[in-house]
Each structure stands twice: as structure tokens, then as C-alpha cells.
Amino acid sequence: MLGSAYASSAQPVVAEGGCANINSYYPETGSTGQFMLVASGCVNATALDQACSIEGFGDTSVVFRTAGETGIHEGYIAIGSRNDEAKNPLVCDDNSPSILNGLVETGVSGYSYQPLNITSIPYSAYLMWGLPAEATIPAQFYHHYVDGVPQDGLFIGANNVTTWAIKEYSDSGSKLPYWLFRLLGPDSADPVTGAALEEGELKTFIKVAYF
């Protein structure tokens, strides 16, 4: 089942077992090999076929820079605008406070694995690193069911929601345009206009994929 029919009928169920849901899980270490996140089941309601140009595209990182600070301390996980650009690999570790740990830019010129969590502001619930624990909610793995039948794939979300809004952005500090995604959970509508989606936003799931 594909497209808007699948998006509207898929029921998320928490995938018990944490990191053990990843294909490359090593029980002896409690950790996994590298994987990535991709846009899956993306729906563009303005297109005749409702298709998205970024269906199946993988993740990238977008750093958040604060004026006057040296180095990189936080940022976003996004979907790249081109699928041939380098991906930011993720791992899962039973000993980490987050099921998602991304290899992202940190410090002045380095990379390190950082816990990824969802911002706790309902209408801007992006997947980020570098935020204090009290400003985030944990991401979770989910399976999808349609009419009681399990569907292929492992998805991320929180609070029994796996649908995300996704929108293209471009700024002077980025290598390429990128697509930020935010969780469409309770109270995710624009607090001023009440709109469920911003102009230019599409709906998608975010799925675990392998290199």
C-alpha cells in the first residue's frame, strides 16, 4: 500500500526491544552497526500523483550556529535535497540515553556521535542534537500496521505518532538545500494561524534504512 491511502491508514505500534530492532544489532555489545534515516511514504497533496521528489532520500545534518560562539554545539537531522550527497550515519546503543546517535559536526572541525532527540516544543518538534534533556522528548522505533497486518519497515516517532511534516529550506551556511522534518503530534499546529501544515510542508514518515 502506497501514497496517501497508506499514510492515512497506517497505525504505529511501538517496536519493543530498542536497538535489537536494527538488523546489525550485536547482543554482546548492545550496539548496532551504522544505519540511516530516509523519507518514506511522502505525500505531496498539491501534485496530481501526490508524489514527492525526495521519496527514499537519506539524511543529512544542518548545524545551528550562535553568534559569538566558537565551534558547533547543536544542530538538526534533515533529509538531503540530493540523494547522492554524503549521509550522516546513525547507530543505536543500549547504553545511550537515546535510541538514535548520529555522527555529526561538533567542536571546531570534528565529528562525533551525539544523542538525537526530538525538541519538546509541539509545533517545532525537530530531530536535533545538543539540546538539554529537559528541552527534548525521546525518539522511539515503531512498526506500522494496516488493518491489523504488519507492514515492512521500522520508523521513528514519539508518543505513538510517526507522521512528520517536511519542508525544503536553504541558507547561506548550508552546502545544499535541505528538508527539515517536524513531528505532527498533539498541538503541532501553528499556534497563531491554527494551520496543521505550513506553506510548502509535505507529510512523510521517517524510516530506518541501511547502507
Image (tube, rainbow, N blue to C red):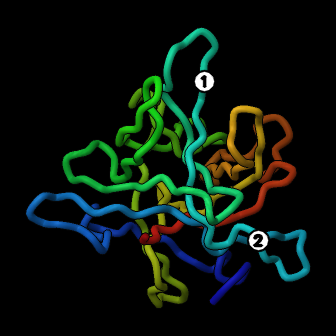
What residue is pinned by disc 2? Answer: 52
Quadrant of the image for the C terminus? bottom left
Q: CA distance from mark 2 to mark 1?
A: 30 Å
Q: Quadrant of the N terminus?
A: bottom right
Q: 91 or 94, which lies in front?
A: 91
Where residue 98 appears, x then y in whole percent?
33, 46
Give the total number of marks visible in the rendering: 2
Q: Position of residue 107 (x, y in %)?
A: 43, 25
**Mark 2 or mark 1, whichever is nearer to me:** 1
Q: Residues within 10 Å of mark 2 (few under 14, many from 20)?
A: many
> Which numbered dot is residue 17?
none
* Residue at figure coordinates x 69%, y 61% from the top left: 82
Residue drawn at (53%, 75%), measured in percent from left and top?
A: 11
Quadrant assignment, res 132: top left
Residue 119 lies, in percent from the top left, at 53, 38
Counting residues from the start of the chain, the first of labels 2 and 1 encountered is 2
Residue position for label 1 = 65
Is 99 displayed left or right of 65 in the figure?
Answer: left
The image shows residue 28, relative to residue 177, as above or below, that is: below
Instruction: Decide: is 179 above or below 108.
Output: below
Tag 1's secondary structure? loop
* Contact (Cβ within 8 Å) of mark 2 with mark 1: no
- The amino acid pointed to by label 1 is Arg
Between 124 and 196, the one lying in front of the other is 124
Q: Amino acid at mark 2?
A: Cys
Quadrant assignment, res 121: top right
Foreground residue among 78 and 96: 78
Q: Is residue 198 left or right of residue 68?
A: right
Residue ranking furthest to the top: 68
Residue 58 at what x, y percent from top left?
57, 63
**Mark 1 surroundings within 10 Å by alpha-carbon count, few (fewer than 14), some (14 through 19), many (20 or more):** some
